[in-house]
Amino acid sequence: MSDAVKVGFAPLSTPVRGILLAFCDEQLKLGAATRKALGTAAETIKRAAAANQFKGKSGSALDILAPDGVKTDRLIVIGIGKASDLKQNDFLKFGGIAAGKLNGGSHALTVIAELPDAAMTADQAAGIATGLRLRAYKFDRYKTRKKDGENGAVRADVSIAVEDVAAAKKAFAPGACIVDGVNLARELVNEPPNVLYPEEFARRAGQLRKLGVTVEVLDVKAMTKLGMGALLGVAQGSVRPGRTVIMRWNGGKKSEAPVAFVGKGVCFDTGGISIKGAGGMEDMKGDMGGAACVVGLMHALAARKARVNAVGAIGLVENMPDGNAQRPGDIVTSMSGQTIEIINTDAEGRLVLADVLWYVAKKCKPKFMVDLATLTGAIMVALGTDHAGMFSNNDELAGRLTKVGLETGERVWRMPLGPEYDKQIDSQFADMKNTGGRNGGSITAAQFLQRFVDGTPWAHLDIAGTAMGAPKTEINQSWGSGYGVRLLDRLVSDYYEGKK
C-alpha cells in the first residue's frame, strides 16, 4: 500500500522538528505549551490571521511560511472553533486537514496536541494521528510519471507532542490497525480488473493468514458440491472462475457464536447478457466494494487482536457476456434449494450474496450477519452518496448500526422491508425472480436477500453510493473509500467484543 506516513508520540516539551502544526480557537487563543514553543511567533499568527481573515473557525487553516521567532520553515495553525463544541470525529477531521496541507513529497511534521485550555486527551491525539494517516493514502502505483503540479503520495515523519505519551500510544494502537484495514479495502477497490480478478482477490484475502486468520477458499468444484447454483450462474460467463472465501478470526471464547460479515465481490460487472451502457462501465471494477470492506475489517480485527469470534465471507465472480453466460429466462437453484428466475443478468450481486448468506447462516450459525454490497443504483437515487442504505430484520442490530454510523461518520439510513414488496419478486415459473422492476429497486433487492438469511438477525448495507466515487472528505481523497471498515469495527468493539 502507498501509505508512507509514520506517526509517533513525544512529550509536549519536545523540540520542534520540520513543519510545526498548532491549534487555536475562534478567539485565536493558543495553549500554554503551544505559546512556549512558538515564542515570538505567536504574534506573527495574529498579524497573519488579520491579513488572511482567519478567524479560527472549525477546520479552517492558516499557513505561514518562514515565521519569525521559531525554528521552523512553515507554521500551520488549524482552527477548532469553540472548544466546548468539539466531538471526537472533529479530531479525525483536523488530522486529515493537516495531511492535506502537506501536499506531496517528504516532510517532517511536529504536531502540538493541545487545545487552548488543556492538552488533548489520549483519544483526541489518537484521532489526529488516525486522520493524518487516512487522508495521506493515495493510489498511484500505475503512474510512471507525474504531470506538472500533480502531487505524489505524502511521505511524512510525524511527531505528535502530547501530555501522556504512553496513554496516546495505547489509544492509537487499535486505530492504527483499523487504518491499515481501511487502506487495504481502498487498495482492493482501486485495483484495475485485469489485476484483481476472483482468484487473485482470493489470494490476497489469504494473506490474512499471517495475522492468525483461518482462510478457506472454495473453488468451482467445492461450490458445485455445495449447490451454490446462484453464484455459479453469475460466474459461468467468465473465463476466470468464481471463488468463495471464508475467513475466521477466533479471538473470543471457543463456545461463543461468531459475528459474521458477508461481502459482494463482483470483480467486474459488465451486466452480462443484459449488458450495461458503455459510459462509466470502467467504474464497475469497484463492484466488489463489499468484499473489500470485509477483508479490510477482518484485517483490522485480527491485527488488533479483537476479543471476538468473527467470520468474513465473500463471493467472488466476474459478470461477463460470454457465450456461456446465463440468460434472462434461465432458472437457477440456490444452495438453499430455492429456485430463482433470471429476469435481468445485471441484477447479479444478490445472486452471489444469496448463496454466501445461506452458507454462513447454516454453517457458522452466527449471532448476526451484516452484508455489504454495491447492490443498486436505486439507493443512490434515494440517499445520494452520504448515507448507505440499511435494511434489517432486527431492530436492535439496526439501532446499533445507526448509532455507530453517527459516531464514525460512516452513516446509514434505515429503509423499509415488508411482505407487501414480495409480490414484485414472485415468479410464475420459479420461487422468485431476481429483480422486481424499477419501483423500490433497492427495497426489493433487500427483500430478495432476506429469503436467504434463515431467520438469523441480519442487516444489509447497500453501499453503492459510498464505497466508490463518493465525495472526497477531510479523511478520504481516494476513489475507493474503504467505507464500512470503521463502522463495523466500532459495532464489534462497542457491542460484541467480550461485552455482550
Image (tube, grey):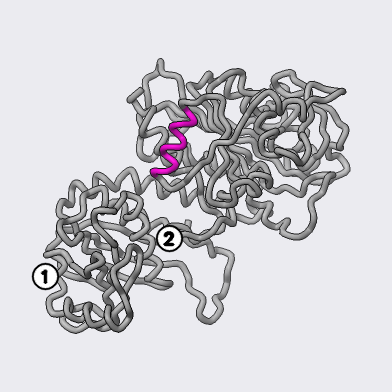
Q: Mark 2 points at which residue?
A: 474
Dot 1 amino acid type = Lys
Rendering quarter of residue 491: top left
Q: Is residue 16 left or right of residue 131?
A: left
Magenta region, residue range: 397-407
Identity of the residue furthest to the top in this view: 255
Q: Which residue is drawn at 17% across and 76% down?
A: 42
SS for callout 2:
loop
Q: Which residue is drawn at 73% across and 56% down?
A: 281
Q: Which residue is drawn at 38% across and 29% down?
A: 495
Q: Callout 2 environment at 10 Å: few (<14), some (14 to 19), or many (20+)?
A: some
Rendering quarter of residue 356: top right
- Quick check: 17 above or below 293? below
| Residue 246 can be seen in this image | no
Mark number for residue 36?
Answer: 1
Dot 2 amino acid type = Glu
